[in-house]
Image: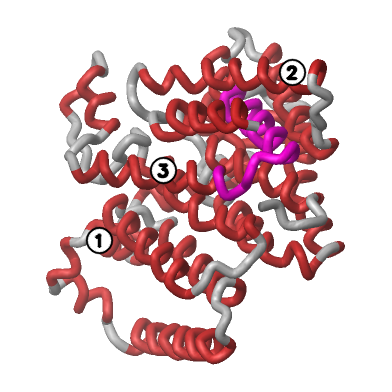
Amino acid sequence: MRISAYWVFLYTIFALVFIGVPGLSRGGIVSVLLGLMLMLYGIFFKNKHFPTLLWIPLAFFSIIFFLGFQVDFYPINTVGRLFTAWIGAIVLCMFVSNGLSLRFIILCLALVVIANFVAYAIGYDARSIQLAQADSIYQYAQVKRVTALAGQTNLLVVVVYIFPFSLFLLRKKIGTNSLIGCLALGTVFMILTASRSTIPFNFLLLIFGCLFFIKSPFIKISVTLIGTLVLLLITYIILTIPINTMIENSNFADIGIVNRTLEALRSESGSVEDRFSLATGFSHYFFERPITGYGPAQFEVEVGGGLYAHNNTAELLINYGLLGTLVFYSMYTIILFNIINFPRLNYFLVAPLVFLIASDFVYVTHYDRPLVLLICLLLVTSSMRYRRV
């Protein structure tokens, strides 16, 4: 276990901390190859157990690999990134199923958040470095939203929020102070990234945190009641008062997240309409190849005109057809089945599962390493009939 723990730390650094740093990010696939060799050695020579449920994510990646041969030029870069995401997550979860502590995994995820915050504090932004190295007009573009070490704003959001939702994997109450700290963390990065998806993520964290993490029934009821009253008050203000105009004329309009939210409410943000049209206007392309799709990363080529869908289901159906889509969502189904079958032990896992489902509507979940890791961890954790310490 000591060697596997060293590998997890190595994977955390190169595949998650340096995920968007030019040059160093390539260490991710190297760390995964090392982990794969370590896993195979453990299985064949040390009689280590490979969980049955991990055959499903392995089958999903196999589908990705073989469907790549449908593309005129095999998408090596895309399949390589997905190899890092899926095989890395499978190796890590195999170690967890053989005794590696979940607390250690969560500690590594906390390290990822801390590293990104430190990068922001010292003024490092991976996206700025990427643009400076680009041999195009983009090298003169200005980065207005923080990307820290992730190199991409949405990826930074995923990297940050995976930590608080991974705490539910412990399947035990962590207390009010820990929940407040997680909410404060989410609020800070919501302001830094100006990402609208952080708003529902914070809301989910608050709701499930109050339900599952807070021990005091009085605090639970109080927070729920106050939250309901605040929500009703906000709804009343939006419906009866020209709140948009009031905020636009205030100092709050200079805050990135406020400005971008107002743009969406006024339908001035083209990205919202573009994402919606991409996520709903792909049916014609899907029915041309409904079973196996067009191959990895082909949504951008066939449908998006160089843009990805910001919707996991749309990308799955176009890239891998019904075959890949059903295999992928079978993992969600099994996790839900395990929660229903063992509710007293697994009800904590509802929170990260709902977080994943929400992510499907704004990200390409099967492409992002932290989300893939959470899926595989949920598969393993939900099948454990005892609390792993």
Q: Do the residues labelled 3 and 1 touch (CB within 8 Å)?
A: no
Q: Which amino acid does label 1 sit on?
A: Asn
Check residue 111 in the rendering and tell me which mark sits there, or answer none: 3
Disc 2/disc 3 C-alpha distance (Å): 27 Å
Q: What element carries label 1?
A: helix
Looking at the rendering, the stretch of residues picked out in magenta corresponds to: 82-104
Check residue 259 in the rendering and tell me which mark sits there, or answer none: 1
Assign the magenta stretch its main secondary structure.
helix
Q: Which amino acid does label 2 sit on?
A: Leu
Q: Is mark 3 on a helix, strand or loop?
A: helix
Tell me if residue 222 is in the magenta stretch.
no
Q: Where is residue 347 in the image (x, y as percent from the top left)?
A: 72, 66
User: In the image, which is nearer the foreground, mark 1 or mark 2?
Assistant: 2
Check residue 40 in the rendering and tell me which mark sits there, or answer none: 2
Q: In this view, does 69 lie above or below 360?
A: above
Which quarter of the figure has residue 38? top right
Dot 2 or dot 3, earlier in sequence: 2
